[in-house]
Amino acid sequence: MKQRARDQWSGILFALPFVIVWSVFTLWPVISGFIISLHNWDPLRGSEYIGFENYKYLFTSERFWNAFFNTFEFALIMIPLTLIFGLLFAFFLYFSKSKAKGFVEGALFFPYLLNVSIISLVWKWLFDPDFGLINESLKMIGISNAPQFLNHPVWVIPAIAFASAWWLMGYRMTIFRAALESQPVEIVEAAIIDGANKWQIMFKILFPLIRPQFLFAMVLTIISGFNVLGQVMIMTEGGPGRSSEVLALYLYREAFSYFRMGRAAAIGFILFVIIFIFTLIAMRYMGNENKG
């Protein structure tokens, strides 16, 4: 019993530094943000407690729901694109025997090394309707009336989501590549001898083995998807109109353009709850799959 108690205390002591850092830099900001969201917050002239008035305002605001659905549209396009293409490129490089696969891997990962402002400016130029490479390429293949992607209310969110997926895909690909390379080669060799094709090896054998790494990449991508801000600010500033205004941009404007910190904190807390719920769903689903 004494040994067991010593082991438990040792575990607690080892975990304590992380718990303290996590509490100070993660847990307390969330709690503090929620407290601010319940106030008409003004630290200079005194904050007034108003209960859930900020939340009531947001849930009856057309602008909030517009930003809410824009955020979901962006996340629903960007998250699958990033994960699926990251996974497919990882499988492609895993099976490739080409000498150029190191170059291809580097080229796919390179965008992730760039700052969000550089990525956003590059794609803004690419989508430019007057001299952008994308519209010019579409004209060359006979599509002369291609939409002005960043100036069209329907196409603007998919265009930003595509650019974001291109930026983030390379890092996810390296996570999957590292996971694939750590698997025993004998498993794949045995599957080939048994007559399995590459698709069966990829999705019936290798994918279940790298599911924990896929879950990690999925959680990262969910957080990136719902927290999108920099790309939208630089590429469209939320336009045309408010057709690409997302929750993080709405939060930023409430806080730093209108100085309504309480309302901005309420948007931030709602964003936290959304990310928390989707992360729990992903972890529960993928965790159960791992147990299976």
Image (spheres, rainbow, N blue to C red):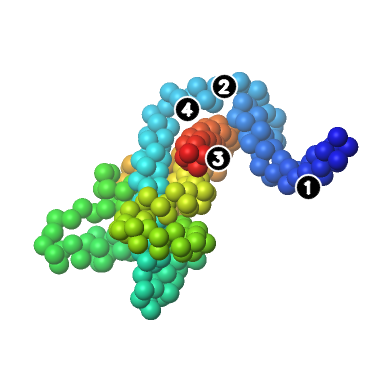
Residue at the image position 45 percent from the left and 25 percent from the top: 59
Q: CA distance from mark 2 to mark 4?
A: 10 Å
For label 1, the SS is: helix
Tag 4: amino acid:
Leu
- Please count the marks in the image: 4
Tag 1: amino acid:
Phe
Residue indicated by mark 2? 52
Residue at the image position 66 percent from the left and 24 percent from the top: 48
| Quarter the N terminus occupies | top right
- Between residues 158 and 22, which one lies in front from this camera angle? 22
Eyeballing the image, is 111 above or below 47?
Answer: below
- Between residues 218 and 256, which one lies in front from this camera angle? 218
Q: Earlier in the sequence, mark 1 or mark 2?
A: 1
Q: Residue furthest front?
A: 194
Residue indicated by mark 1? 14
Q: CA distance from mark 1 to mark 3?
A: 39 Å
Compared across the picture, whether 137 is left or right of 34 comes to left
Residue indicated by mark 4? 58
Question: Residue 206's spot in the image, x, y percent?
Answer: 42, 54
Tag 3: amino acid:
Ala
Q: Earlier in the sequence, mark 4 or mark 1?
A: 1
Label 4 environment density (alpha carbons within 10 Å; few <14, some 14–19, many ≥20) = some
Mark 1 touches mark 3? (CB < 8 Å): no
Residue at the image position 61 percent from the left and 26 percent from the top: 38
Question: Residue 249's spot in the image, x, y percent?
Answer: 47, 44
Mark 2 touches mark 3? (CB < 8 Å): no
Mark 4 touches mark 1? (CB < 8 Å): no
Q: CA distance from mark 4 to mark 3?
A: 14 Å
Q: Earlier in the sequence, mark 1 or mark 3?
A: 1
* Quadrant of the image occupied by residue 148: bottom left
For label 2, the SS is: loop
